[in-house]
Image (spheres, grey):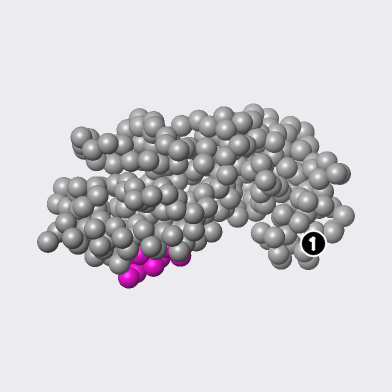
Amino acid sequence: MTNSSSRKHAGPGPATDLPPVPELTFAERARTLAYLGRMGSLSTLSRKQPGFPFGSVMPYGLDDHGRPIFLISTMAMHTQNLQADPHASLLVTQQDTGGEPLGASRVTLLGNVLPVPKPDLAEARKLYLERHANSRYWVDFEDFSFYRMDVVDVYYVGGFGVMGWVSASDYDRSQPDPLADSMAEIIQHMNADHKDALVMLARTFAHIDSTEATMTTVDRLGFHVRLKTAEGMRGARIAFLREVSNQGQTRKVLVEMVQQARSQAK
């Protein structure tokens, strides 16, 4: 799948005549980011100060529809706010980007946060404890209950100038990218051991000369790099030669691309 990015300001660099590079849809990127996250910022509507948003640091689990699950206490102010008005939003941000925070991806989920229905409690408990094992020490306390956000809208920001709304139905139907669980390891390996290869790949496949290249994201269709050039920092998207579905396939296609780049450089 591809996605046409909405660019309202500072894009990744000057426009070129190169064909567009395949990318995940915003819905897929939003689902992937929500899947990778473990913690977000929950904003509820203040009961004490009507009309004002009230922010809370909030661990969450995620069900098969991408709905966040919370384990919250009746003593918490956000729980009291939700009991008075279930409207809320959850902001989840990309972690460990190593660069400008405003260049990182983030997603805001808007929805109604309500107690998990009894038929769904066992599954909600299982999913939540898979992400937050330490919660087993207080999960059965009488004042703690499971709540779930029924998502009504989604806003995704993919970095500078890349942003757009995602419908709740598109978000629901999408799945996390298959490389989500191995993404951090792939990025760490490429940036630690193959920085010269990334410079070569950017020159060959993105037609950008740089003195330094850093992989920032990777998915089944390709990857993004942050490049240090003579004109300053630039970003680029590089497509894989073919779609991949696991870490082994990713390694294989990157080796092929490096070999192709070296062959063209001779």
Instruction: Name the residue at 67% across, 46% down.
Output: 64
Q: Position of residue 54 (x, y in %)?
A: 63, 40
Tell which of 243 and 14 is nearer to you.
Answer: 243
| Total residue callouts | 1
Q: Is residue 186 magenta?
A: yes
Horizontal side of 240 relative to 125 (left or right) equals left
Q: Amino acid at mark 1?
A: Trp
Q: Is residue 256 magenta?
A: no
Q: Position of residue 118 (x, y in %)?
A: 86, 44
Task: Count residues near mark 1 (Cα–Cα under 10 Å), then give few for <14, some for 14-19, many for 20+.
Answer: few
Instruction: Name the residue at 20% across, 35% down.
Output: 17
Q: Quadrant of the N terminus?
A: top left
Q: Position of residue 231 (x, y in %)?
A: 16, 47
Q: SS class of the residue under badge 1?
A: loop
Horizontal side of 61 relative to 100 (left or right) equals right
Tell which of 139 and 251 is nearer to you.
Answer: 251
Quarter location, residue 47: top right
Q: Quadrant of the C terminus?
A: bottom left
Instruction: Name the residue at 37% across, 54% down.
Output: 216
Instruction: Name the residue at 60% across, 53% down.
Output: 39
Residue 250 seen in this snapshot:
yes
Horizontal side of 209 relative to 50 (left or right) equals left
Tell which of 105 and 100 is nearer to you.
Answer: 105
Q: Main secondary structure of the magenta part?
A: helix
Tell which of 19 and 76 is nearer to you.
Answer: 19
Q: Which residue is mark 1?
A: 138
Q: Residue furthest left?
A: 266
User: From the viewer's perspective, is residue 45 above or below residue 189?
Assistant: above
Which span is picked out in magenta?
Answer: 184-193
Quarter location, residue 51: top right
